[in-house]
Amino acid sequence: MNFRVPQIDTEENFRCIALLGGHNTCGSFYLFLSDDNEVGMGVRCETGASGNKSHDDGPLLNEGEGLETNKTYFLQFCYNTGTQEASIWQDKQLAVSSQKKWEFERTGFVSVFVGSHNPKSMSEALYEEDKAELLDLYFSNGPTTTTTTTTTKWFNRTHEDKVVNTTESVDNVTLVSHDEVTTVKTTVDTVTTVQKHIIKIPGANQTAQGTADASKTVTGR
């Protein structure tokens, strides 16, 4: 992520940058700041940044190395589930790493600047007056070791509508073809899905509304 750092000494002991996975509060993967702008990550629980001690280790925190207010940093967070190595990178330099046993939700919501997916909760939030900015947030392929990183974006989704053949007439019926094209790209695949709607209007070159037939095609790689 590219992250502009907020003010320090706020009322919250911890402030959420991003909460990944899950649907409520506990059990999500958690990227956060301390009140002194020390950056950390771990498993979210109601008691704060610490994980549930009966199941998970506590968070990884770059203690004593707070980020400078109003400065923009390129931050990377990596957790290797195979080796249980957790690491935080600051401007492509390793800031802190440690072995951590973490279990967290792999599906669910993504929330930014608030420490709960509950829409009524403002727990561990960053507010407008804190002057934080999340300029970019994306996922990348994890490194095989903690000595190298990659910033290759692994997921990109585009969507567009296309209206074609608006004047084609067949057997005194006007055919209007409306295509919805969705393209998903990863580092290994490009998959394009086309949802085609053929609208049949009685009478050639008419503009009245008619019924729609749908067809779907998928192309890949």
Image (cartoon, rainbow, N blue to C red):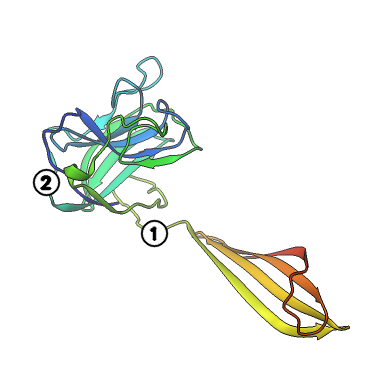
Q: Which quarter of the figure has residue 174?
A: bottom right
Q: Earlier in the sequence, mark 2 or mark 1?
A: 2
Whole-Å distance between the Cαs marked 2 and 1? 28 Å
Q: Position of residue 97 (x, y in %)?
A: 25, 36
Q: Position of residue 104 (x, y in %)?
A: 44, 30
**In front of the other: 50 or 133:** 133
Q: Position of residue 70 (x, y in %)?
A: 13, 50
* In the image, residue 109 above or below residue 206: above
Q: Position of residue 11 (x, y in %)?
A: 16, 29
Residue carrying label 2: 69
Q: Residues within 10 Å of mark 2 (few under 14, many from 20)?
A: some
Left-right relation of 53 to 193? left
Q: Amino acid at mark 2?
A: Thr
Left-right relation of 156 to 205? left
Q: Quadrant of the C terminus?
A: bottom right
Callout 2: helix, strand or loop?
Answer: loop
- Residue most extreme to the top: 54
Left-right relation of 135 to 175? left
* In the image, residue 103 above or below residue 200: above
> Which residue is located at x 76 percent, y 85 percent?
205
* In the image, residue 19 above or below residue 4: above
Residue carrying label 1: 152
